Image: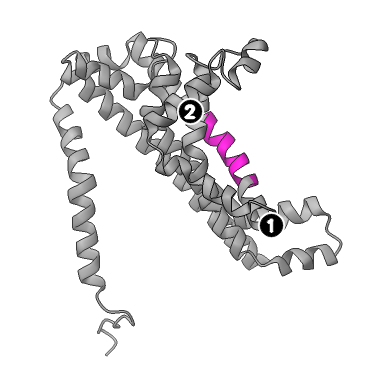
Amino acid sequence: MAGKRKKSVIPGFGLTMGITTGYLGLIVLFPLACLFFQTLDVSLDTVQKTVFSGRALAAFGLSFGASFAAACVNTVFGFLVAWVLVRYTFPGRFLVDAMVDLPFALPTAVAGISLTFLYAQNGWLGKFLYGLGIPSVYSRIGVFIALIFIGLPFVVRTVQPVLVNFDTQVEEAAASLGASRFKAFTRVIMPEVLPSAITGFALAFARALGEYGSVVFISGNMPHRTEIVPLLIMTRLEEYDYLGAQILAVVMLVLSFCFLFLINFLQYWGQRHHRMQECVA
């Protein structure tokens, strides 16, 4: 009896796990693995010339730098949006809640055209920015704006369910014990919301890394200045440089995986540290 495996209350784990693994392997892992292993035959000198060229390094720096900055901004303001939608009742609340999902449904090309007209030198918002000496279109700031637009819903929709399920009585108990609002927020609310906020950051960061449609219109696509890696890959394909496009894609894949692995590790470490503190308390 001791050697027998205990049956699960919910049957079908083996079948569903096999289908899940097979589906993910066929749709996700197999194409990426083929792309990676095909690049192993390329000489190291060719890889170095492609990846460490001035144009490629500038594109990598802009893609990762703008994506990271946009994800940070979205984490802060996405949390604020989720907080307002959950904690307050106001006219038009359901309309605002529906507008959060607009970047999900809106084609990225439409988003890029709209942002370009809005932030152009004679646009509704662009004329104020240009008046302050801030060029918002055909610049790195334009790339930053586009990545903020497409990444905000990921943070809001990740943090919002946690705030909805948060027990406000815990917050009231902290206040009754003499904790200030700031202390109650940092010691009671934030530890519960932080893992979901990190998840939202990772999703927004990953989405921004692969963004193409909304950026190509507002950035100007100038090499060494406003050119992102996805656009550089498309340029290589249009020039029939399939090997160069393949190398850039694999490097982008490896770097993205490393960044996401680091973010997920930090999230896991934060959750484990929080559970340990709860056990000690």
User: Residue 65 versus residue 237: which sits nearer the camera?
Assistant: 237
> Which residue occupies the extreme right position in the image?
178
Q: Is residue 65 above or below residue 79?
A: above
- What range of the chain is rendered magenta? 69-80
User: Residue 109 versus residue 13: which sits nearer the camera?
Assistant: 109
Q: Earlier in the sequence, mark 2 or mark 1?
A: 1
Q: Is residue 123 left or right of residue 233?
A: right
User: What separation in Å lies between label 2 and label 1 (alpha carbons)?
Assistant: 28 Å
Q: Quadrant of the N terminus?
A: bottom left
Q: Is residue 207 left or right of residue 245?
A: right
Judge the density around disc 2: few (<14), some (14-19), many (≥20) Cα neighbours within 10 Å: many
Give the residue at x 39% y 33%. Answer: 108
Mark 2: which amino acid? Ala
Label 1 secondary element: helix
Residue 168 shows in this picture: yes
Give the residue at x 41% y 14%. Answer: 58
Residue 159 falls inside the magenta stretch: no
Judge the density around disc 1: few (<14), some (14-19), many (≥20) Cα neighbours within 10 Å: few
Q: Which mark is residue 146?
A: 2
Give the residue at x 22% y 58%. Answer: 21
User: Residue 187 versus residue 121: which sits nearer the camera?
Assistant: 121
Q: Which mark is residue 87?
A: 1
Q: Which SS type dominates the magenta stretch?
A: helix
What x and y, as percent, mark residue 86?
64, 57
Give the residue at x 20% y 19%. Answer: 237
What x and y, as percent, mark residue 77?
62, 40
Q: Quadrant of the C terminus?
A: bottom right
What x and y, as percent, mark residue 205?
46, 36
